[in-house]
Structures are given as structure tokens and as C-alpha cells.
Image (cartoon, helix red, strand yellow):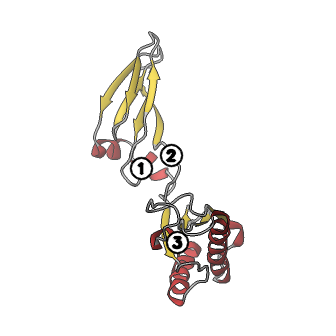
Amino acid sequence: MKSLLILATFLLFFLTGCAPKVQITLLPEENGKVGVISLSDNKGKEYTINQAYEVLEVSPKNEIEQKQDTESNIQAKYAEVLKALPPKHQSFLLYFGFDKATLEEKQIEGLKEIAALIKKGNIAEVMCIGHSDSAGDKEYNKILSLQRAKNVAKALIADFVNQSLITIEYYGDADPLVPTTNNKPNAQNRRVEIILK
């Protein structure tokens, strides 16, 4: 899945002496990727962090100090803050046959397990995202990807998942899991991704 890269950062305010400072720590995403943060100090010098657990410490006078911390230090120092962060989302993939949008018995059983997880967990949103491979007409593929996502959503609702939690997106062949040339079938691209947030 190509998801929007969300910069995994958090701002922590703490006091050292009487002067408040701001500490910006760059946290890795679930997949280990990190974003980039750039700040300029009061003299126009730019500071950039792009490694996990790098820190920019900003004084009230806008003076910046760049540091590298460790995961264990951050976990220990900010345990309460990290515990308060929302849980990481979960992602599941269901694959479809060529030119198919119907769910097979094995997929329906898998969706029952996902529905149980949704009902017992603290899930605020369930995204059903439909995709297709690039074989055939683009407009047809878009409609097919929508039908796949709708069928998955209907199955979840049939298992008593609250309909208001579910959003449907569909991309046709625009967001392949495996890049291919046009009009080339690929089983991994014929899918619905279910994301639990």
C-alpha cells in the first residue's frame, strides 16, 4: 500500500531550570521509515533531522541544538507520552481472481476474524480500499476496484461491524502493490486493503 507518509514526530515541552525549551524528536513509522524536519534558528542557520530518534532542542531565544538519542532513552524518558499515543493501525489484504469482485468462502472466514477484532478493539475507522491490476480498460478497472471494496464492506457489516466506522476508497490500477506494464495482469494488484485505525 502506498500510504500518505505521516511524519512521526511529537513535541514535548519540558523545563530546564526556569527556561522552557521545546524538544522535537523524530520517531520512525511502523515500517521503519522516517520523515524530515527542518528548522531555522534566529541567525537563519538551518538544522535538519532525518534519522530515527534525532532531536532538535529549541531554546526560548530560538537557538537550536541538534542531538542524536537512542530508542531506549526515548522510551524510558517519555514512556507516559508514548503510551498515550494512538495505537498503530493494522492492515489486511484480500486478493481477488482476475475480473472478480465476489468473495470466496476463505475470504469470508478471514473477514469474520477481522470483524471480531474490530468489535473487541478500540477501532475508530475501518478503511476498505479497492484496487485492480492494469489488465483491461482503466475505467472498468476503477469500477471493479470499487465493487471489491463495497463487497468487503458489506461482509463486515453483515458481521455486525458498525457501518458508520467504514469508509470506502478505490483506485483501479492507479496504486499497484507490484508495478507492472500497462495491460499486464498481476494477482497481487487485484486486492482490497482493510486498514483498522
Q: How far, Cα to Cα, is label 1 from label 2? A: 8 Å
Q: Which residue is mark 1?
A: 29
Q: Secondary structure at mark 3?
A: loop
Vertical comparison of 73 with 175: above or below: above
Q: Nearer the viewer, residue 167 or 184?
A: 184
Q: Secondary structure at mark 2?
A: loop
Residue density around tag 1, few if under 14, some if 14–19, many if 20 or more, within 10 Å: some
Q: In the rendering, at what x and y percent does residue 156 appear?
A: 63, 78
Camera-nearest label, 2 or 3: 3
User: Which residue is found at the position 37% from the left and 35% from the top?
Assistant: 50
Q: How far, Cα to Cα, is label 2 from label 3? A: 26 Å
Residue density around tag 3, few if under 14, some if 14–19, many if 20 or more, within 10 Å: many
User: Which residue is found at the position 53% from the left and 49% from the top?
Assistant: 4
Vertical comparison of 40 with 155: above or below: above
Query: 16 left or right of 197?
Result: left
Q: Which residue is mark 2?
A: 6
Vertical comparison of 86 with 152: above or below: above
Q: Give the amino acid type for the residue marked by disc 3 in the picture.
A: Arg
User: Which residue is found at the position 64% from the left and 72% from the top?
Assistant: 144
